[in-house]
Image: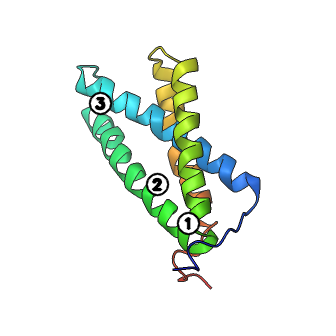
Amino acid sequence: MTDLLRISFPSYSLVVTLILFSIARFENQRWKQARLNGFSGASQSFGGFVDLLAVISTVYFYLLLLAFAFDFGLVFSVSCFAATVISSILWALVFRCDNPLLWLIGTAAILPIGVWLSFSTSWFGLQP
């Protein structure tokens, strides 16, 4: 238990990238919410992809936080969660209007940022 409470801070680029991932997820969630409210495009299959990516990215985000707790300690993981929540709130206050271009950029950014973040953790000691 004391191993999870240790304080270990990796580079700031990891925290900034996690914040960017959270903002991308937020814009994807906005798109999903707009689709639930009747916003529809030409392709139903792409809309399904947007909805599926919203679920996958949310699950992946919490798995990343668990992996960060394993690798860097619980304090770092909770700090990252707090930083992502605060940054998403600030982002929502600055960009209040629904903007399909931001939805598209955020949705497109989820996959490359997620891949980059996957190489920054050991995934519970599984990677060498």
Seen from the viewer's position, the closer of residues 107 and 45 is 107
Foreground residue among 73 and 42: 73
Contact between marks 3 and 2 (CB within 8 A): the answer is no
**Residue 42 seen in the current view:** no
User: Residue beneath label 3, please?
Assistant: 43
Residue 95 position (above or below residue 5): above
Check disc 1 and report the residue beneath it. Answer: 74
* Quadrant of image for the C terminus: bottom right
Q: Nearer the viewer, mark 2 or mark 1?
A: 1
The residue located at (68%, 46%) in the rendering is 16
Residue 120 seen in the current view: yes
Asked if the residues shown at circle 3 and circle 1 are in contact, with their CB atoms under 8 angstroms apart, the answer is no
Which tag, 2 or 1, sits closer to the chain's start? 2
Q: How many other residues sit within 10 Å of disc 1, few (<14), some (14-19) or many (≥20)?
A: many
User: Measured from the top left, where is residue 25 in percent x and y?
Assistant: 47, 40
Residue 108 image offset from top left, x and y in percent: 51, 39
- Could you tell me which secondary element the residue under label 1 belongs to? helix
Mark 2 lies on a secondary structure that is helix
Counting residues from the start of the chain, the first of labels 3 and 2 encountered is 3
* Residue at 68 percent of width and 55 percent of height: 14
Give the residue type that dot 1 points to: Leu
Instruction: Give amino acid for label 2.
Output: Phe
Q: Gap in Å between the C-alphas at discs 3 and 2?
A: 27 Å
Disc 2 residue crowd, few under 14, some 14–19, many 20+, Cα 10 Å: some
Outermost residue on the bottom side: it is 128
Vertically, is 128 above or below 116?
below
Identity, as a three-letter code, of the amino acid under mark 3: Ser
Q: Residue at x 52, y 35 (%)?
A: 106
Q: Residues within 10 Å of mark 3 (few under 14, many from 20)?
A: few
Please, what secondary structure does the residue beneath circle 3 have? loop
**Where does label 2 land, which residue?**
61
